Image (cartoon, rainbow, N blue to C red):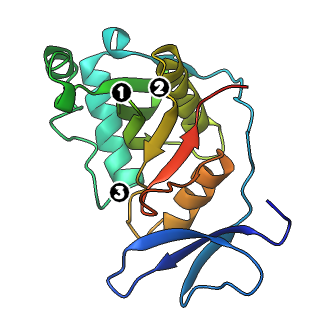
């Protein structure tokens, strides 16, 4: 990508976000965010650990999801969604591909501070929800790194998600995902994708 290019996020008349590549002479009608895309960002290392389903304590997960709803409310998804808020039910649904969610909880200083729920599908690793209690501590990056590693181990080539459209924090969400190396999916600009294929 040239220095004069980036990713443009624009909002349609219906309020739906869409992403497109920007170059000289191409500008959207209503600009929301322009951010340079950092390609092939390296995975991070930090003192944050990630717990998987078998290690998550239900009462602590419930407290985390409640806190996330207060700190970072979403419009398109709920932290306490029945598909991922109960660890026992998540495990019971593992034989049902459409509802088989994988859960990750970020832990720092023995506190649950971040959450990711997603599905490992045949062609993509779909992130359904991602939330963190503390910003600028690489919590979201650590969760995405862990989920991406799970996908790579399953031979899944693409990380895929749709950023929540809640107005509050929307630009920060888009910037975070772009900085993570994601860009508009070729088949649907409302989604962001990242190749997990390693050279």
Badge 2 element:
loop
Residue 76's x, y, as percent?
Answer: 28, 58
Which residue sits at x=30%, y=62%?
75
Figure check: 141 above or below 71: above
- Residue designated by label 2: 156
> Which comes sooner in the sequence, label 2 or label 1?
1
> Which comes sooner in the sequence, label 2 or label 3?
3
How many numbered markers are drawn? 3
Which residue sits at x=84%, y=64%?
2
Residue reaching furthest to the right = 3
Residue 108's x, y, as percent?
Answer: 56, 24
Decide which of 73, 96 is in the foreground and name it.
96
Q: Identify the image quadrant of residue 12.
A: bottom left
User: Viewed as shown, does residue 104 lie left or right of 47?
Assistant: left
Badge 1 element:
loop
Decide which of 125, 116 is in the foreground and name it.
125
Residue 42's x, y, as percent?
Answer: 74, 32
Cα separation, mark 1 vs mark 3, equals 30 Å
Decide: few, some or many residues near mark 3? Use Cα within 10 Å; few <14, some 14-19, many ≥20: some
Question: Residue 73 — which label?
Answer: 3
Circle 2/circle 1 CB separation < 8 Å: yes
Which residue sits at x=22%, y=41%?
80
- Residue designated by label 1: 122
Badge 3 element:
loop
Figure check: 129 above or below 125: below
């Amino acid at each position: 990508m040239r220095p004069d290019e980036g990713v443009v996020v624009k909002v349609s008349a219906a309020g739906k976000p869409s992403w497109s590549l920007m170059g000289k002479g191409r500008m959207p009608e209503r600009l929301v965010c322009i951010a340079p895309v950092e390609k092939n960002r390296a995975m991070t290392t930090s003192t944050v650990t990630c717990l998987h389903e078998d290690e998550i304590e239900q009462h602590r997960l419930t407290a985390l999801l409640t806190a996330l709803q207060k700190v970072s409310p979403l419009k398109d998804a709920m932290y306490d969604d029945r598909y991922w808020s109960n660890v026992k039910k998540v495990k019971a649904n593992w034989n049902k591909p459409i509802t088989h969610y994988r859960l990750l909880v970020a832990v720092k200083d023995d506190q649950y501070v971040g959450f990711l729920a997603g599905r490992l599908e045949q062609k993509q690793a779909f992130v359904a929800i991602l939330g963190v209690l503390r910003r600028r501590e690489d919590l979201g990056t650590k969760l995405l790194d862990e989920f991406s590693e799970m996908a790579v181990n399953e031979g899944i080539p693409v990380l895929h998600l749709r950023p929540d459209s809640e107005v509050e924090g929307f630009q920060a969400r888009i910037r975070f995902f772009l900085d993570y190396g994601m860009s508009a999916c070729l088949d649907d600009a409302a989604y962001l994708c990242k190749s997990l294929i390693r050279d």
